[in-house]
Amino acid sequence: MQNDTQPLNGTLVRKSLSAADYVPTLDAMLARTLERIDLKKQQGLRTPDELWIVDHNDVYTLGQAGKEEHILQRTDTPIIKTDRGGQVTWHGHGQLVLYWLFDLDSLKWSVRNLVSHAEQAIEDVINDCLRSSPSNSDNISAHARRDAPGVYLYADTAATDDSTSTDDNSLDNKIMLGKMASLGFKIKHGFSYHGIAINLNCDLSSFNAINPCGYAGMQMLRLSDFVAMQTDSEQTEPEAQTEQQMSDSFSYETVTQKLIDNIAKRHAGLIELRAIAPK
């Protein structure tokens, strides 16, 4: 497991972990959170918040109140009980995982604020990718749901070739296609850890062995099925692509950077929360 740490602003740093096993990552995240809690309580120190960008080795994780019945099939992939909220999910290569080690009290964020910022950051980035892709038909968009945490793709049945939906925030006239991003946080003494997972170009078959997030029959989606994304070989051999292909496609790294930039702006107070859309 290799990692590097870089500052994003005066109160936020990023830490990147590649080929990371789940248990040592969780142990390190919890240890850092407990250390920060102690420094604040004992010395009144506000330590920089941390955004961990993680490429996990394959693993199923079962939330604190997770039910074993949502594991439909046992495979060679390890199943780890963890202390976040939510049910069972999968993490692995091609999926972007970001852990939010934030001091919510110092940010003056409620837990609801945290969840909404996470969902809206994902919405912003996915919708930006969809709008920028020439292969998108303009009627697919990403939205959070009030009744189920995460971000989902919807098709707008009201959109036509020469018109667009009248209200991007309303889910009226929209059909849910499936789920692209999951959320699961843990709050301890006002500090958050765990975070979000977005399917970019991963193998979705791993979700077939579970009820994702406890929802039987939930269709999981990945961004690469809706916008052009570069493969590993194309990223290492850019000469194999035309200039047009490169400009029209996204890499794992470019999507990751878009999301990091959005979260950093929210952390700095430069992006305000939007009103939560009605059901």
Image: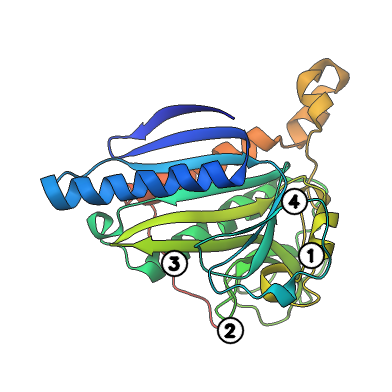
Q: Which amino acid does label 1 sit on?
A: Asp
Measure how far apart labels 2 and 1 are at the Cα level: 27 Å
User: On residue 274, which mark appears?
Assistant: 3
The answer to whether marks 4 and 3 mark residues whose Cβ atoms lie closer than 8 Å is no
Closer to the eye: label 2 or 1: 2
Up the image or down, 111 lies above or below 101; here it is: below
Residue linked to disc 2: 279
Q: Which amino acid does label 2 sit on?
A: Lys
Query: Which quadrant holds the C terminus?
Result: bottom right
Give residue 204's quadrant in the image: bottom right
Q: Earlier in the sequence, mark 2 or mark 1?
A: 1
Q: Which amino acid does label 3 sit on?
A: Arg
Farthest residue toward the left?
43
Q: From the viewer's perspective, is 23 left or right of 104?
A: right
Q: Earlier in the sequence, mark 4 or mark 2?
A: 4
Q: Earlier in the sequence, mark 1 or mark 4?
A: 1
Q: Which amino acid does label 4 sit on?
A: Leu
